[in-house]
Image (cartoon, coloured by chain):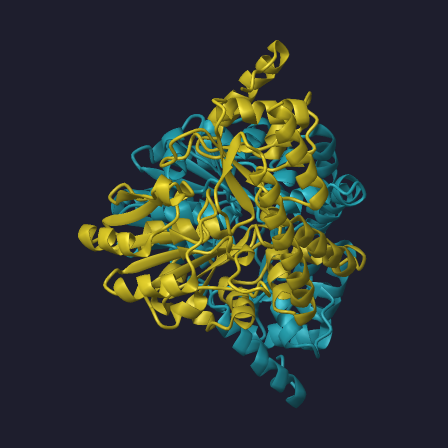
Chain colours: A yellow, B cyan
Amino acid sequence: MIKLTENEQKIDSKIRQLKEAAGSHSPSLFTIVEDLPELNIKVDACFLSNPYATELFLGYLKKELVDTGKLRDVLEFYPSQNDVIADMISKSININKDNIFVGNGAIEVIQAVMHTFVGKKIIVNIPTFSSYYEYAREDTKVIYYQLDKKDNYSLNADKYIEFVKAKNPDSVVIINPNNPNGGYLDYKDLRFILNNLKGIENIIIDESFIHFAFEDSEYSLISATELFKDFSNVIVIKSMSKDFGIAGIRAGYGVMDKYKVSRLLKNGFLWNSSGLSEYFFRLYKRDDFFNEYEKVRKKYIIEAQSFFEELLKIQEIKVYPSMANFALIELLDGSTSADFVSKMLIKYGVYTRTGSDKIGLSGEFIRIAGRTKEENKIIIDSIKDIFN
Amino acid sequence: MIKLTENEQKIDSKIRQLKEAAGSHSPSLFTIVEDLPELNIKVDACFLSNPYATELFLGYLKKELVDTGKLRDVLEFYPSQNDVIADMISKSININKDNIFVGNGAIEVIQAVMHTFVGKKIIVNIPTFSSYYEYAREDTKVIYYQLDKKDNYSLNADKYIEFVKAKNPDSVVIINPNNPNGGYLDYKDLRFILNNLKGIENIIIDESFIHFAFEDSEYSLISATELFKDFSNVIVIKSMSKDFGIAGIRAGYGVMDKYKVSRLLKNGFLWNSSGLSEYFFRLYKRDDFFNEYEKVRKKYIIEAQSFFEELLKIQEIKVYPSMANFALIELLDGSTSADFVSKMLIKYGVYTRTGSDKIGLSGEFIRIAGRTKEENKIIIDSIKDIFN
């Protein structure tokens, strides 16, 4: 069982304070580095993004903006309006631009949808990404659908449909793959659910981690945006932060009925993209960039999956099946997740995320992101060492 | 009178299409450059920002982020949460952090205030920045207070107080200096108005151009945030885009009653800053950066004022008094503002903004931003030439 030394306990109490200040999320690495200069952080395994994609984006940015001096234009001038950027995304995802709402990160799309379209009752599966209940309006009732620990917190389509029909909400949210466990609902099951829930006004499908999921041996890209063409009650929410490794530039979008897009743009959201997110979306529609991206996406999937296999060999933890770029692990030796997080951070410089603040998880849980091959090795070695 | 050649007329019709698509705003320079590659744009005099401040920010960015490789951290990781950044701003403006709401540009603060706090009735002075009426909720009635052309569209405190008291709104907006004319209400008059309008729930003071105004020969910084300490119904909205020349990074904030800040953060706006705007606000609180900024702010004020003096010498236009970094000019020779904009853009590569889409302006108006000394000379020479 993990025990903190006296010195570690002192730092631990500061970590707990920062965590408390950050609410149901993790304090950012910036905040931690600034407030705890005594730490030597080597790996941010709290952070769910593809580091190879960051590298790729940075390469383009250096070549096209920094070296040419064009970075100035991107920082100095106003970026284009919402519908101009929607038009760029339209070309990348083969969806009419009138169906695309561009957000300052997916979180702004979540906020806009929760505040504007979700009505009196929404069903949120737990465990989940907390914004889906935290951003609910005061007059919206949030009903939790508890994913079963016996099913490894995966979504069972039949049980889910039955529950939704019985509660009759106006909105439901499916995160696919789900955060924090990485559970994946395949395309066929998703279509089955949509076919059975045609009467629901808003079916929100959050695909922020979908680029890491696969259904064939080629790791071909999957997306529910295709299903949107058949089911107009679908709202697909997509963060670009994770798959493209660019959380700092805040890029995301939603695909939804065009009346919903016009409603949002009617009195707001005109200039919510930054110059860099506009630059990113300009890249995103370019074949040269996209082809390079596909290589690093697949490379990262392969490494994440082999990372999960290494985790599976550690006896003191249970690893939940994941189609995302992170694994939910349960501590089986009696250690608390708070002690695990502090020990990993203080002794090994590896920042991981507790699952103990997640509604719907019962046990001591940690969510660990897959990073580069080298970083994954540091994470694995640290966890092995922690239990010795 | 300005006449377009046949060839200019062809390009002009494309410009008009872009303008139409951009609604009550100007199409961005990116859009224009992309859609009209035949143009050779030399000066963006549509764009209201201090180019010397952009230079200063870029210098810091290069030294501290690009050259050190730290740019990666800013782009890859999640920025800090709203209240962490509010704490940084707090140190810069000497206001309690609980009174600061950080926005993805001032426009997000405007949107949040218009959607959340403005009630059934708001008074908006015209001519104005259009978002103050466009972002109104459907159940908010917008009452226009027409600034008098005979007063050069400046705000007369007594007449204004009388009008507001007669209409009894819950909210009013004062942009100071006003956009698009640059009219300035001095600190003493502003206090007088606040003293007389204590019963109004929200007095929104938009200070996006205040860094260009001055009341003494030292050009000392002025701000209504000091007045907020005496009048809790004041909501100060501040864009950083204009004074710091960084519109592309989207940085802004609002200063308001702490209950209003908590209301906004209760179910939204957690991660609305980008990595670069966080970096900017970290700079903003540093003395070394701020001292350098003060130099370029004053330099730019001096040049803008001498630019206005040159404009005043041109007989075919009337120049309205301005304490901002732009001048509103009226065409007196019978030319239309649309022809002026097109001619300036096509023949001289100078992008200016029409005022003909502004509610509350009667006549043919152009808004021209002051830029660098060299660019101002190009603008002046072009205008002189256009009337020859």
Asked where in the image residue A130 lies, by quadrant, the reply is top left
Residue B165: image quadrant is top left
Is residue B241 among what the camera can see? no
Left or right: B339, with A181 as reference point: right
Q: Position of residue A45 (x, y in %)?
A: 60, 38
Question: Quadrant location of the C terminus of chain A?
Answer: top right
Q: Is residue B356 left or right of residue A157?
A: right
Rendered location of residue A7, percent (x, y)? 63, 12
- The image shows residue B2, relative to residue A344, as above or below, that is below
Q: Is residue B19 visible?
A: yes
* Number of numbered labels in the structure image: 0
Above or below: residue A75 compared with residue B313: above
Q: Outermost residue, bottom direction?
A: B6
Front in this rendered view, residue B280 or B143: B280
Left/right of residue B6 with respect to residue B378 in the rendered view: left
Residue A387: where, in percent of width, then height? Answer: 59, 24
Q: Identify which residue, B188 or A48, lies in the foreground.
A: A48
Frontmost residue, A364 versus B253: A364
Residue at horizontal 50 percent and vertical 68 percent from the top: B22
Whether residue B224 sits left or right of residue B382 in the image: it is: left
Residue in the picture at 64% in, 60% down: A279
Q: Give percent across and percent down for residue B175.
A: 47, 47
Q: Nearer the viewer, residue B325 or A69?
A: A69
